[in-house]
Amino acid sequence: MKTLRAKFIFWICLLFILIGTLIFISLSIILPEKITTQILKRDIKIAQYLSREIQEPLLVNNKLALKLLLEDRLENLQDAIYIFIHGRDGNVIASTFQKGFPKGLLNINQGLSGIKKSDEEAYSVEKFLVNSKKVYDIAVPLLKGELGTLHLGVSLESSKTEIAGFTKINYYVASVIFIGLGMGVLIFALLGIFLSNRIIKLKDFAVKVGNGVLNERIDINTKDELGSLAASFNEMVKSLKEKIETIKRLSYLEERNRIAFDLHDGLAQNLADIIKRLELCERLFKLEPSKALEELEGLKKNTRDSLNNVRQTIFDLKLTQDSSFNLYDNLTDHINNFKKQNNVNVKLEISDPIDNIVTDKAKIIFYTIREALNNIRKHSVAENVIIYLGRDNNDELTINIKDDGKGFDINEAEISACDSRKFGIISMRERVSSIGGLLSIRSKAGEGVEISVKIPLKEQKTEYVI
């Protein structure tokens, strides 16, 4: 029973059964007992009245008048089956039995033996069976027990017809109530199915949105809560679509900035350097042709480097379209090529696995290390480089790149970079900052350079408050 519809129908049916059970118990058990209790209360009042009525003939010992009075009252009482007076000495003073007194009655209902004389409303009731029929013996003291006890035997068999008739009427009323409840349950069940269908429609729409379908709208045009929820869903999808378009535009701008970072110390700088050296060669050919040829040899090498930078940029542009990026493989390949081309000893130390780093962060880490190696190649004149990667207890990646080159003054380098549009240090910091990391550089002239990077690998969870 997992669906809302099934739960709704189940609880409605359970409510229907519960109400029906309560009605049945009320009419079949509780109501007859209540009616019986009321009839007994009436008969007790009659017995108490009769006890006062027979005191006078009993005091004067007029047994004939006493017997006639008892027989008359027995004839007029619908529920009564016998009346007798039990004297204090244990004998029967008078009774309505014509064929002899049943001796067993004297042992029934002796609950008044310890009665207080001050209790004028005392009585005792005892139930027993006669021929499988219930008989209630009502005992009332005569003159506070001084004259004996009046016993009135009543049977409710004659009242069963009245009880059955009254119960039948109540059964009719209960049937009407039950039918009304059944119709209410049916209406609620149909309403539940109707509401659950709309909820299922909302759920299916949410699944579609989760799968990236943002061009549809949910059509629930009612003015209730579900209609408001559907309208909110439509507004949410519209807003989500707009935000995705905004993210795409921002991603496009970020990609442009990334390309600019890739070219900042690559093609643009090298082309400017080539132009200057060509102008120098032009002047040298007029003055010293041999030096001009030497300059052309160096220029050829720089042009080849520029070509390699362009190829690297093209490779990076293609790389961004890949669904996955293996940081370890790309990093080791680049370091091996770097060592071969630049005659620099580069040592890579990795203390923890880096294969499970998400693609976006892995690319930024790779570009940052590559940029640092390019700066070492161009500026440091280093012979040895140590690159270390490791994680700490907070699932934060630490990158440390240290060379034994000539070093530089950090403040002067950053100012110079801003003035000459050489964004090496700035580009690395912006890349690292884009994934929530921090980059710091320590260097002094003649003491090499040490670059430290801290990048959080744990994804940040966004909490939504509803």
Image (cartoon, grey):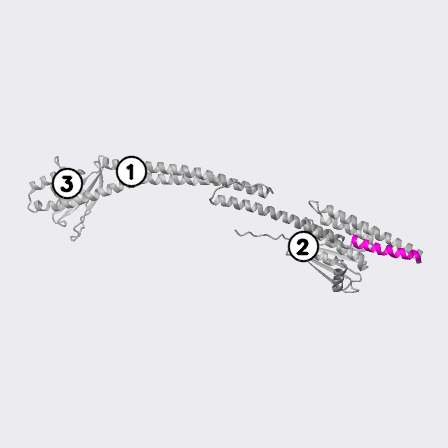
Work out how far the residue at label 1 is from the one at label 3, CA to CA, in angstroms.
34 Å
Q: Can residue 382 be found in the magenta stretch?
A: no
Which of the numbered marks, if any, corresponds to residue 83?
3
Disc 1 residue crowd, few under 14, some 14–19, many 20+, Cα 10 Å: some
Distance between mark 1 and mark 2 Cα atoms: 79 Å
Residue corresponding to mark 2: 434
Specify whether residue 462 is in view: yes
Q: Is residue 90 left or right of residue 334?
A: left
Amino acid type of disc 3?
Answer: Ile
Q: Which mark identifies residue 170?
A: 1
Q: Earlier in the sequence, mark 2 or mark 3?
A: 3
* Residue placed most toward the observer, 342 or 275: 275
- SS of the residue at dot 2? helix
Q: Are marks 1 and 3 in contact (CB under 8 Å)?
A: no
Give the residue type at disc 2: Ser
The residue range painted magenta reads 266-286
Position of residue 95 in the picture relative to residue 16 (left or right): left
Three-letter amino acid code at disc 1? Answer: Asn
Residue 415 point in image, percent of width and height: 74, 63
